[in-house]
Amino acid sequence: MSSRERFGRDYIEAELKRIAAHLQTDVEAYLIGGGAMSLRDLKDTTKDIDLVVANEDAFSRLMGTLRELGYEEVTDLGEEYAELGARHCVRNEDGCQLDLFHRQIADKLFFSEGMQSRSEEFLSTDSLSVGLVSLEDIFMVKAAAERPDDSSDMATLVQTRLDVDVIKQEIAAQVELIGGERFTTVIASSLEELDSEEGIQTPLDETIPEYYKR
């Protein structure tokens, strides 16, 4: 069990505003993981703030600002975090870690136009806008990431009565973007863990095998 610090809604919001105050040019980012759950009051704390930026130049500008604020590259990532595929993992002096992605998440999921359109605005300043991806898309991110605590987070999300049709549509989109074999294998594994660890089955348990048949 990790001994790393955990951070709640108030800290996440304050840190995003601190970053916004130091940015010199516009950056559009999206919260995709436990941080998004905390800001939706579905999780008390999180160890990581997962941010995805779709634009390469904006990504570079954000990284420059984080370095100016004292964020340092994380070199002690465990295997599960190394496999996550974040473009950069940086941590501030409080121990808060930002996992930063450019378009592709966990090498297993692409930040699609559908994910972007379903997001809700959380923060909007002159220099930084932050959206919260939908609950359905957080579920997809958690299923793809395969990190510790993801199964329990997926169980929490299921209790919100997710729109399964939206998830099925996104699965179809991801199969086209990423490739069916790798993507469905990862999702199937996460759904099996959700069943074995949390005792939860979903209609997706029937959807994924259909892609294997294809």
Image: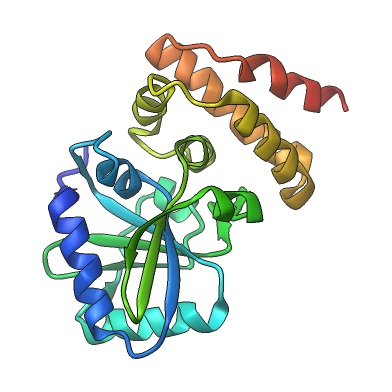
User: Is residue 60 shown to the viewer in this render?
Assistant: yes
For image coordinates 43% across by 66% down, the residue present is 29
Q: Quadrant of residue 17?
A: bottom left
Q: Quadrant of the N terminus?
A: top left
For image coordinates 67% across by 30% down, the residue present is 168
Front residue of 46/3: it is 46
- Rendered view: 66 above or below 142: below
Horizontal and vertical percent for residue 13?
A: 20, 59
For image coordinates 40% across by 88% down, the residue present is 25
Q: Quadrant of residue 103?
A: bottom right
Q: Quadrant of the C terminus?
A: top right
- Rendered view: 100 above or below 195: below
Front residue of 6/148: it is 6
Front residue of 183/203: it is 203
Horizontal and vertical percent for residue 206?
A: 69, 14
Along the horizontal axis of the image, is 207 left or right of 194?
Answer: right
Horizontal and vertical percent for residue 59?
A: 47, 77
